[in-house]
Amino acid sequence: MTSRKMEKYELILNAALKVIAENGFHGSQISKIAKEAGVADGTIYLYFKNKEDILISLFQERLGNLVAMFHSSVKETNSADDALRKVCEIHFTELENNVNLAYVTQIELRQSSLELRKAIGLVVKPYIQLIEHIVERGMSEGSFRQNLDVKLTRLLIFGAMDEVVTSWLISDRKYSLSGQVDKTVEFFLKGLK
Amino acid sequence: MTSRKMEKYELILNAALKVIAENGFHGSQISKIAKEAGVADGTIYLYFKNKEDILISLFQERLGNLVAMFHSSVKETNSADDALRKVCEIHFTELENNVNLAYVTQIELRQSSLELRKAIGLVVKPYIQLIEHIVERGMSEGSFRQNLDVKLTRLLIFGAMDEVVTSWLISDRKYSLSGQVDKTVEFFLKGLK
Amino acid sequence: MTSRKMEKYELILNAALKVIAENGFHGSQISKIAKEAGVADGTIYLYFKNKEDILISLFQERLGNLVAMFHSSVKETNSADDALRKVCEIHFTELENNVNLAYVTQIELRQSSLELRKAIGLVVKPYIQLIEHIVERGMSEGSFRQNLDVKLTRLLIFGAMDEVVTSWLISDRKYSLSGQVDKTVEFFLKGLK
Amino acid sequence: MTSRKMEKYELILNAALKVIAENGFHGSQISKIAKEAGVADGTIYLYFKNKEDILISLFQERLGNLVAMFHSSVKETNSADDALRKVCEIHFTELENNVNLAYVTQIELRQSSLELRKAIGLVVKPYIQLIEHIVERGMSEGSFRQNLDVKLTRLLIFGAMDEVVTSWLISDRKYSLSGQVDKTVEFFLKGLK
DNA sequence: TATGAATGAGACTTCATTCAT
DNA sequence: AATGAATGAAGTCTCATTCAT
C-alpha cells in the first residue's frame, strides 16, 4: 500500500473505532463509518473487502500493536514473576488509556459473527501463547510449581484478566483498572507457586 | 401458568436451545424454532413477548436452575475450600453434560443485543455473588488470606472458569472439561492463601 | 333470535362501541371487544359473522334507530321548513348526546374497508332519501324554489350537516353542536327559496 | 433536491397515486408501488421516510397545488360571489379532470391512520380558511348577510361540496361533476344572502 | 352455548454491497 | 481513486378466525 492509501486506511479504522464505541456494534452502519471518516460509502470498499473486514482489521491493527508491545516488554524482564506482572500491567494500563478500544474489543465486537470471532481468536492466540511461555519460563526457572498444566493455566490467567477488564467497563469505570494490577498479580503468583 | 401451558413453554425453550445450538444465533429464525417445537409461528408469541424474551427466558430457566443447584450444594460443604471446589465441579460438570446449553450460553448468546446482555447479567450476578460469599467465608474461617479484595477476587475466579469452558467448546471438546476441575481449584486455592 | 341471544348481541355491540371510541378503529381488536363484553373471543363469532359484521351491525342498529326517529318526527311536521328544521335538530342533538356513537360513526368507521363503507352507505341512504323527500315536499308545497335539483340538493344539505358534526368532534366539542341548528337551517332555507 | 432527485420523487408519487387508485388503500403494498415506479423497494425509502410519508406527500403535493390554484384564482375575482363561484368551479373541475386524485383523496386516504389524517387536515385547513375569507369578504362588501357565522358557514360550504364530489365518485361518475357548479353555487349564494 | 389456545398469512423496512459515472 | 444512488433479500410480529373441548 502506498502511504496515501495507508492514510485513508487508518482514517477509516479510526472512524470505525469511534463510531462503534459511540453507537454500539448494531448501531454502526457502513454509512455512519463513512460519514465519520469523511469518505463515500463506496470508498470503504476500496480499502476493505466487506464490513467484517473492517472489524477484523481493527482488531488486528490495534490489538496486534498491543501484542507486539507485550513481547518487547516481556523480553526485558528478569524473571517470570516480573514478566507476568509486566503483562498484567500493560494489559490493564493500555486498555484503561484506550477506553474506546477496550469497549469495542471487550463488549461490542463480541456480539459478532462466528467468522469474525474466529479472526479475533487468531489475534488473541499469540497473546495467550505469550502467557503460556511465561508459565513455562517460570517452571523452568523453578519459581513456579512443576505440576502446572500450562495449557490450562494460560486460560485461567487470561480469562481472569479479561473478566476484570470487562467488569470494569460495565461498572462505568468507577474505579482504577490499573489499580487492580498488584492484587491480580499476587493472586496469580500465589496460584502458580 | 397451568401445567398444560408450562408444557408448551418448555417445548419452545427446548426447541430454541436446539435450534440455536445447531444454527447459531443469527441463523435461528422464529419460524425455525416454531417448526422444531411443532407449533405455529404465532404460538410462540402466546408464551413469549418477542424473540429476545425467548433467549432471556432460556438463560433464566436453564442457568437459574444451575445457580439454585450451586446454592444448595454449597450449603452442604464444610469449608470454603470445599465450597469452591464444589462450585467449580458443578460449573464444569453441568456444562459438560449440557453441551447445547454451554454452547448457546458461552458462544451464541454473547453476540446479542445490549438488552439481552443486561438480562444475562442479572442471571449471572447471583452466581458471582455466590463466589464472593465463598471468598468471604474463607477469609472469616481463616483459611484464605486476609488481604483479599473480594470484589476483584470473585471476578478472577469467575473469569478464569468462564474462559476454560469457552476454550473447551472452541477446541471442539477434545478433552474432558470436568477433568480440569482439580488443577483449576488448586490454582484458585493457592492464589487465595 | 331469542331474548337471551339478543342480550348478548347487544352486549357485544355496546362493548364494540365503547372499545372503538376509546381505542380507535385500528386499536380495536376482537379480543379487546370480547374482554369488554365479558365473553370469550370465540363467542363473538356465534353472534357475528366476522369483525366487519360487528361494525356494520353497530351502524345499522344505532343509526337505524336514528333514521326511524327522523321518520316519525318528520311525519308530525306541518311544513317542509319545519321538517328540515326537525331533521337538523335531531341530527345534531342526538349525536351531541351520544358522543361515542358520533365519534365512532363520523371518525373511526370511515377508515374501514370498501365493503364496510358500502354497508354504511346502505344505512345512510334512507336518511339521504328522507332529506330528498323533504325537498320535494317543499317544492310541491310551493315554499321551496321550483328549479331545485333534488338529487344534488339532498347531498348539499347532508354534506353540510355531516361536516359540521365532524368538525365539532375534531375541535374536541368546545362548543354546543345543537347550538348550530338555527344558523344551519337558516342557511339551508334561504338556499332553498 | 436536485432535478434528478425530483424526477424519481415525482415518479414514485405518480406510481403511488395510480396503484392506490387501482388497488385501494389496503391493497397498495410498497412493493407494488415500487414495481409500478420501476424502482427497487428500497429506493422508495431514499425519497420517503416510510409508507405514510408517501401518502402525506401525495396529499401535500397534489392538493397543495390545488390550494395554490384556488388562491391565485380568487385574487382575480371582482366580488365574493365571483370568488365563491370560482372556488366551486375549480374544486369540481380539477377533481373531475383528475379522477385518480379525487378517488384517492376522497375515498382511499380517508381510511388511514390518525397520523395521516392529521397531516391531511393541515393541507385542507388553508382551503377551508380560504372559504372563510370569501365569506368575510362578502359580508364586508355588503353582498352577504351580516348575521352569518363565518366559522359555521365555511364548514357548510366545504362539507356540501365535499359530499357532492364523494357521491359523484361513488355513483361511478355517471354524470358531470362540473355540471353541478351552477346549481351548487346558486344554493350557496341564496343561503348567504 | 361457550371457551380460548392455536393458527399462519402477510408486509414494512434496513443496510451491506455494487457499479455507472 | 472516488462517489453515492440504487439495489433487493430477509425476518419479526399481529390478529382475525377456527375448532376441539
Image: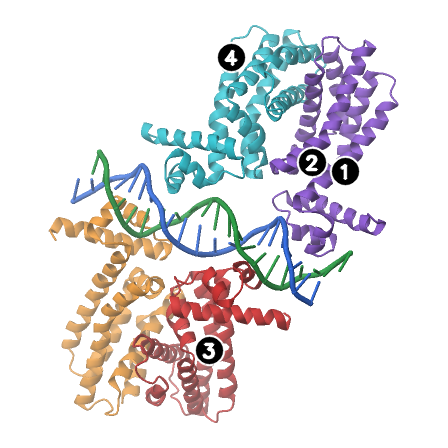
Chain colours: A orange, B red, C purple, D cyan, E green, F blue
Query: Amino acid under label 1?
Result: Arg
**Residue for badge 3:** B127
Q: Distance between the residues labelled 1 and 2?
A: 10 Å
Of circles 4 and 3, the one toward us is 4
Query: Amino acid under label 3?
Result: Tyr
Q: Where is residue B4 in the image (x, y as percent from the top left)?
A: 62, 71
- SS assignment at label 3: helix
At horizontal 67% and vertical 47% (from top left) the residue drawn is C50
Q: How far apart are marks 3 and 2 (CA)?
A: 59 Å
- SS assignment at label 4: helix
Which mark, by number, is residue C105? 2
Do discs 4 and 3 share a chain?
no
Q: How far apart are marks 1 and 3 (CA)?
A: 62 Å
Query: Amino acid under label 4?
Result: Ser
Do discs 3 and 2 share a chain?
no
Most foreground residue, A145 or B30: B30
Where is B108 relative to F2, above or below? below
Asked whether the beta carbons under mark 1 and mark 2 sit within 8 Å of each other, the answer is yes
Q: Residues within 10 Å of mark 1 (few under 14, many from 20)?
A: some
Q: Position of residue C87 (x, y in %)?
A: 79, 24
Which mark, by number, is residue C62? 1
Of circles 3 and 2, the one toward us is 2
**Residue for badge 4:** D73
